[in-house]
Image (cartoon, helix red, strand yellow):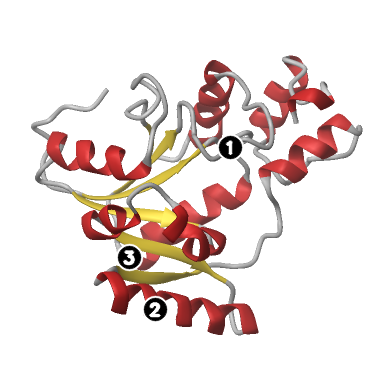
């Protein structure tokens, strides 16, 4: 989907199942562009995340369509099938290695939520993740959680030599799991996902089967 001969850029990577993508994902992408002067954000749905064992992940086609709808009209947001085009389980360490090989001129920034910074040591080869990219971690402003997050960032920097910076974004308490549960129970997801994503979910009857949540 991308040409290898593109000029050098600062690229933010937003990965995950996006099941579904929601407004907090978009907010983080916008903040990363603004705060760290990135050129683009690549939204990269995962194909088959090994750690997602608590629910059945929605089909790739539907998740990709929702991402494309969500970022439509955002000129510096791009959809990437880099990860889902690979067969089998996908690991962040492997994806980042392949990205750097495919686009050696680009500088990559991996955008994560605060929770990921606490769990990153349980990932597949976390040292490879932290060696290959700069991590931008979402942070809540001026609360105890932010202070704890800074301590975690310092710990990872000292142990792994990681480059970790915090994103000073507004708080948006929303998760994909909460949205799936709301949709199943007839609740409102209005203003939590882009309108065209909400319409897609309704038209395709997503998240109606509790066995798939």
Residue 30: mark in rendering: none
Disc 1: which residue: 52
Quadrant into which the N terminus falls:
top left
Residue 36: mark in rendering: 3
Across and down, in percent, residue 191 comes to 74, 46
N-terminal of the two: label 1 or label 2? 1
Label 1 crowd (10 A; few <14 / some 14-19 / many >=20):
few
Residue name at image x 36 percent, y 72 percent: 156
N-terminal of the two: label 3 or label 2? 3
127 in relation to 1, above or below: below
Labelled pair 3, 2 in contact (Cβ < 8 Å):
no
Please identify, in this view, whether the residue under mark 3 or under mark 1 is nearer the observer.
1
Residue name at image x 89 percent, y 38 percent: 187
Find the distance from the CA under tag 3 to the CA under tag 2. 22 Å
Query: Which residue occupies the foreground of this view, 102 or 123?
Result: 123
Q: Is residue 41 left or right of residue 50?
A: left
Q: Is residue 146 left or right of residue 104?
A: right
**In this rendering, does residue 105 appear at all?**
yes
Across and down, in percent, residue 21 comes to 59, 38
Picture quadrant of residue 46:
top left
Across and down, in percent, residue 188 comes to 85, 40
Find the distance from the CA under tag 3 to the CA under tag 1. 30 Å
Residue name at image x 53 percent, y 67 percent: 169
Q: Is residue 184 left or right of residue 137?
A: right
């Amino acid at each position: 989907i991308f040409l290898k001969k593109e000029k050098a850029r600062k690229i933010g990577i937003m990965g995950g199942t996006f099941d579904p993508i929601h407004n907090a994902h978009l907010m983080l992408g916008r903040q990363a562009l603004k705060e760290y002067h990135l050129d683009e954000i690549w939204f990269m749905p995962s194909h088959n995340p090994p750690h997602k064992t608590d629910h059945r992940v929605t089909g790739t086609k539907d998740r990709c369509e929702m991402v494309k709808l969500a970022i439509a009209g955002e000129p510096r947001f791009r959809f990437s099938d880099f990860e889902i085009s690979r067969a089998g389980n996908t690991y962040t360490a492997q994806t980042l290695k392949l990205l750097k090989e495919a686009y050696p001129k680009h500088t990559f920034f991996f955008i994560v939520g605060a929770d990921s910074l606490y769990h990153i040591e349980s990932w597949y080869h976390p040292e490879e993740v932290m060696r290959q990219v700069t991590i931008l971690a979402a942070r809540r402003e001026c609360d105890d959680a932010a202070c704890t997050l800074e301590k975690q960032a310092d710990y990872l920097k000292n142990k792994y030599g990681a480059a970790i910076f915090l994103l000073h974004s507004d708080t948006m308490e929303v998760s994909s799991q909460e949205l799936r549960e709301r949709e199943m129970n007839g609740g409102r997801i209005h203003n939590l996902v882009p309108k065209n994503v909400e319409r897609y979910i309704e038209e395709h009857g997503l998240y109606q089967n509790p066995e798939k949540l």
